[in-house]
Image (cartoon, rainbow, N blue to C red):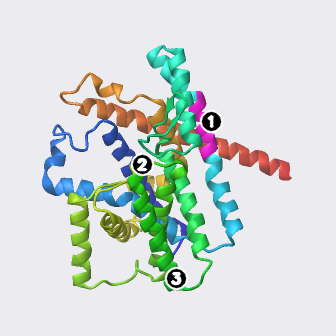
Amino acid sequence: MKNSIGMFDFVKGFSVCIIVIGHLLNQFNLASDTTLSVLEIIPLRILYLCLGYGTMAMFIMISGYGFRKKKVWSCIKQQAGYILKPYILVTIAIAVIFPVVHYLFFRWKAGAIKEMIREVLAFILVVSGESDIVIGEYALYTCGPIWFMIALMNSWIILNMIMQTDNTKMQKILVLIVTVTGLFLSGYGIWPFCFQQSLIFTGYLYAGYRIKKDKLLEKQFSVPQKIAMGICAVIGGAIGRVEMANNIYDLGIFDIIFSGVVGFIMLRISIHINEYSGIIISAVKKVGRYSLWIICIHTVESICFPWYLLTDGSRIHPLPGVFIAIVAKLILISLGFVFIDRTKYFLGKISSRNGD
């Protein structure tokens, strides 16, 4: 199998789609809603839960697959330059768009400004989920899906420091200590700057690194090994629960192991799909190539727009509201993507002219 930058385009695009849909279902409390009868069919429900269960782990392991050791300061500068720029842009976008949208919907200027300040503070402290963090009169909630990028940046820096030793056994011991520490601290609420998630991500990141190092994507596993992985996937999808943003791991360390196994299975399957072409697969690959920016746009639309209003008047059967929300989200994300793509294109032309 050829290692290339584009070999994970499909799986990254697929992951982003699952994340957006999962956030939408959670927003409307539909993951367990009996009105969605299709999810009550046991095989489909297990499939749905497994996909959600392993998607985040898979995304982190993909990042780990491309890990390369650098000098500590070089790694910090690289990660900060790659992640903090879009993060700051999203924060500015929230500060501008949020009060405008909320004033248009609720016609309360003071409330719109107050809620905007609360959101910006959540971005400054990188609050990932439902927290007890209070600053003055502002109870902070979440900075949205973009917290994932900060946690990933932190975990890269942590892993790079661990990898300064060339002793593989010591690497594994240190990664295990860091991951278990993050899991232990997860029981003490949400901390600023995604502290616990950053420690736990280090384990997934190292797993991705080992997948490449040990050539596990090419390895032929025995039947007992495949059965064992299948059992882990079913158990994790059926009774496990992973909500990384809120530091929830119902099965403790087994949730981390099982979700990693599910992510690995999804990774093995998806790289073969990546070899095919077609309208849908090509579209998903394009989403994968621009996954970072799409997560940024998804963060802006999920925080700035009160999507819950679409189902407030249809509690008996919220599917129409969900359908409208999906279409609206796709339109907003597409428009945002076109805007970013065109902006980068024109900035590139200006830069090339100045270079001439």
- Does 19 appear in magenta? no
Q: Secondary structure at mark 2?
A: loop
Residue 273 left/right relative to 143: left
Reading the chain from its start, which is encountered first: label 1 or label 2?
A: 1
Above or below, 99 relative to 225: above
Q: Which of these two is toward me, 5 or 125?
A: 125
Q: Nearer the viewer, mark 2 or mark 3?
A: 2
Q: CA distance from mark 1 to mark 2?
A: 27 Å
How many labels sit on residues? 3
Magenta range:
87-96
Q: Residue shown at 22%/83% (left/top)?
A: 224
Q: Name which residue type carries label 1.
A: Ile
Give the x, y percent position of residue 19: 39, 49
Q: Which mark is residue 92?
A: 1
Reading the chain from its start, which is encountered first: label 2 or label 3?
A: 3
**Crowd rating for badge 3 (residues with CA inside 10 Å; few <14, some 14–19, many 20+):** few
Residue 245 left/right relative to 122: left
Q: CA distance from mark 3 to mark 1?
A: 42 Å
Q: Is residue 2 visible?
A: no
Q: Which of these two is toward me, 211 or 220?
A: 211
**Crowd rating for badge 1 (residues with CA inside 10 Å; few <14, some 14–19, many 20+):** some
Q: Residue shown at 26%/21% (left/top)?
A: 313
Residue, disc 3: 170
